[in-house]
Amino acid sequence: MARPNPKEADTLAPFRYLATGIIVFLLIALFVVWRLDNPRVERLRAEVIDAILPKFEWAMAPATALIRITQDFRSYQSLYDQNQELRRELRQMKSWKEAALQLEQENARLLDLNNLQLDPKLTHISSIVLADSGSPFRQSVLVNVGIQDGIQDGWAAMDGLGLVGRISGVGSKTARVLLLTDTASIIPATIQPSGQQALIAGDNTIAPTVEFLENVDLVRPGDRVETSGSGGIFPPNLLIGRLALDPSGRLRVRLAADYERLEFLRVLRNFGTEPIDNPGNLIINKSLNLLSDDESTVANGT
């Protein structure tokens, strides 16, 4: 491999130093001139810029495109963050709205319960529904009052609209309410305004049947159905619901109580009933006794 001639290197060295000095001088002079605050220099700078920059547009295009992409990305990121924040606020507002609606509904039910018109002689205990039976064969709910609150088997339970059922099983701090829709529930009732006597029997549907009606021709759909007070089981004149006809033409009761939203119940104190040994058969036995008495009366009359 050929090595550079030292003589040639020594000959070119002064030229390199001279060229470097000239370049440095020109750069310093250009910097000084460029910084001068003079109209002529300003005009010169403008002419130089106008002459040089257009020729470098192709070189600046990639940098300009990169800057635009960066700006667009930042703008997109900002819009995305704003969108996510708005979505979070919207979800929070929806949850607040649902909570407000739920509180409004609970407040309405409490107002209904408070405005329920009852016999002034009757006192009551307010309760909260804890759970339902969860079974299609057992229609009942659990409330948060019990023996320590003085609750007794057989007492009526109502919501803000009408009769719900009766106490059937009492614990220390809870009690079970057998609903009117349960097959074990049979209630002596009076149909107004005709005054006809009947039994309201649950059959695990939302509309209990009307049994042993004295005279079908004297009642109409829409008539008011109340407890009769027969047998001393329930106080009289408690609203059960309204008469209705099912598609087969059978008389049923459209219950006044809102069974879809049983949250608060009022348990009515009724110390006029006889001591109850078997709360499960309370309604059935009493009702059958009433029917036997009615049949005997009819037989004697004939």
Image (cartoon, grey):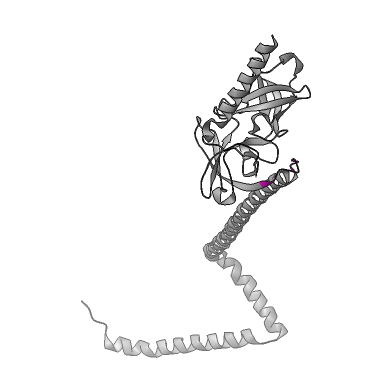
Q: Relative to 174, is 12 above or below?
A: below
Residue that sits furthest to the right in the current view: 193
Q: Position of residue 184 (x, y in %)?
A: 54, 28
The quarter of the image holding the C terminus is top right
Task: Report if residue 268 lies within the magenta region.
Answer: no
Q: Position of residue 57 (x, y in %)?
A: 57, 65
Q: Nearer the viewer, residue 35 or 162?
A: 162
Identity of the residue drawn at 63% across and 23% down: 290
Q: Nearer the viewer, residue 207 or 148?
A: 148
The quarter of the image holding the N terminus is bottom left
Relative to 154, 302 lies left or right:
right
Q: Position of residue 255 (x, y in %)?
A: 67, 30
Which span is picked out in magenta? Answer: 116-124
- Residue 57 visible at all: yes
Identity of the residue drawn at 40% across and 86% down: 16
Q: Relative to 275, is 128 above or below?
A: below
- Give the quadrant of residue 6: bottom left
Q: Relative to 27, is 184 above or below?
A: above
Q: Position of residue 31 (x, y in %)?
A: 58, 85
Q: Relative to 85, is 31 above or below?
A: below
Task: Report if residue 122 lies within the magenta region.
Answer: yes
- Residue 247 visible at all: no
Identity of the residue drawn at 56% across and 27% down: 285
